[in-house]
Image (cartoon, rainbow, N blue to C red):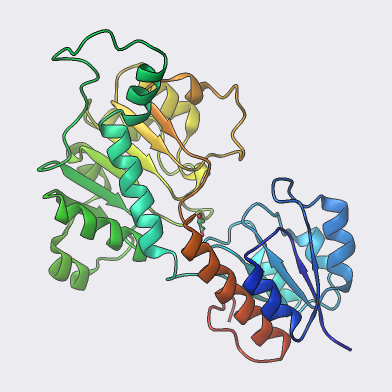
């Protein structure tokens, strides 16, 4: 009998075909509706492999129902949506997709930084609304990027890739991380600083830490007060790392200049969220790794590790060895 695999969303076709070669595959067909809890509960009781998304909450209660499950393969590098401890206790392997999305996510982060600094979405809306009456010297003036300081909080693979882009733009790059990275300091040209120094001296503060119990609410009111008035906060990591209420207050009180956000505490972000009312907040719907080619490679990597685990082999990207 073929092992059963449940995929919680439409994914690139090639990955589905690959899984179908040796497994019985069921796919939740709706691209823009997350799989309902009752469907997931039913599917997980029979599945040997679960191929899921960062939007699926794979918690302990759900994992308890998974009597045949060998692997949970997450189509993301972050896996804060999965209760790793509960999975490990049941001997279920959990995999993610690191590495293959590094450059694409760094591209998006830099695009968001530039769009926020130069007020790109605001300027486009201004033109389309028919408000462009004449050229004027102070019209939609933004912040410079070259020669400014970028502070990266959390220097993993993506942080390093952002730093490389910033150096290309002639920025001064500082970082704060749990441990120093002497090799990156030397090869890219970065300076390690304390968290306080980073916040006090950076024109751009980029959040790149994983989302864990330690980083929940990491950036809050006290930190915004330390930042420069022209500072721009960029978050493409996870929403819960930044206190959104404190960010809103910092923006309306002029403690910082703007924010670019690809991630929110609640996703999709509710349309009446206060941050969406501010013109100096550029918002995106969690599209960090969303290029056609990267999403295809992520799906291939996740499928290949799922198959390894189902066949009793060790997946390449195992997060709970
Ligand atoms: C990830 O892989 O964790 C990213 O947030 C996806 O864009």
Q: Is residue 58 above or below residue 72?
A: above
The quadrant in which residue 200 appears is top left
The quadrant in which residue 318 appears is bottom right
Depth check, front residue: 250 or 120: 120
Depth check, front residue: 277 or 92: 277
Of the 4 image quadrants, the one containing the C terminus is bottom right
Asked if residue 65 shows in the view, the reply is no
**Residue 178 image offset from top left, x and y in percent:** 33, 61
Asked if residue 249 shows in the view, the reply is yes
Depth check, front residue: 141 or 266: 141
Q: Is residue 107 above or below residue 144?
A: below
**Residue 77 image offset from top left, x and y in percent:** 51, 64
Q: Is residue 134 above or below residue 104?
A: above
Q: Tell whether 129 sits left or right of 265.
A: left
The quadrant in which residue 247 appears is top left
Residue farthest to the top?
133
Depth check, front residue: 321 or 293: 293
Q: Residue at x 29, y 23 (%)?
A: 255
Q: Residue at x 86, y 75 (%)?
A: 67
Of the 4 image quadrants, the one containing the N terminus is bottom right
**Residue 10 image offset from top left, x and y in percent:** 70, 59
Q: Residue at x 62, y 38 (%)?
A: 268
**Residue 72 image offset from top left, x and y in percent:** 69, 71
Q: Is residue 15 above or below residue 3?
A: above
């Amino acid at each position: 009998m073929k092992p059963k695999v449940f995929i919680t969303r439409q994914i690139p076709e090639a990955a589905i075909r690959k899984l179908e070669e040796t497994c019985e595959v069921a796919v939740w067909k709706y691209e823009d509706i997350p799989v309902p809890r009752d469907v997931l509960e039913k599917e997980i009781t029979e599945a040997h492999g679960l191929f899921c998304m960062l939007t699926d909450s794979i918690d302990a209660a759900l994992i308890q129902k998974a009597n045949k499950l060998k692997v949970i393969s997450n189509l993301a590098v972050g896996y804060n949506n999965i209760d790793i401890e509960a999975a490990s206790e049941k001997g279920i392997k959990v995999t993610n997709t690191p590495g293959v999305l590094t450059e694409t996510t760094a591209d998006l982060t830099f695009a968001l930084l530039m769009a926020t600094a130069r007020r790109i979405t605001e300027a486009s809306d201004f033109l389309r609304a028919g408000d462009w009456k004449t050229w004027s010297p102070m019209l939609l003036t933004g912040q410079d990027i070259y020669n400014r300081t970028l502070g990266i909080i959390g220097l993993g693979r993506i942080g390093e890739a952002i730093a490389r882009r910033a150096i290309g733009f002639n920025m001064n790059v500082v970082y704060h991380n749990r441990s120093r990275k002497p090799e990156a300091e030397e090869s890219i040209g970065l300076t390690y600083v304390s968290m306080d120094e980073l916040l006090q001296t950076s024109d751009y503060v980029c959040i790149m830490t994983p989302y864990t119990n330690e980083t929940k609410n990491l950036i809050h009111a006290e930190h915004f007060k330390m930042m420069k008035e022209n500072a721009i906060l960029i978050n493409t990591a996870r929403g819960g790392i930044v206190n959104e209420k404190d960010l809103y207050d910092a923006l309306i009180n002029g403690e910082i200049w703007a924010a670019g956000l690809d991630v929110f505490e609640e996703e999709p972000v509710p349309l009446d969220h206060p941050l969406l009312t501010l013109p100096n907040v550029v918002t995106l719907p969690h599209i960090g790794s969303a290029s056609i080619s990267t999403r295809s490679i992520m799906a291939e990597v996740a499928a290949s590790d799922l198959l390894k685990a189902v066949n009793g082999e060790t997946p390449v990207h195992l997060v709970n060895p």
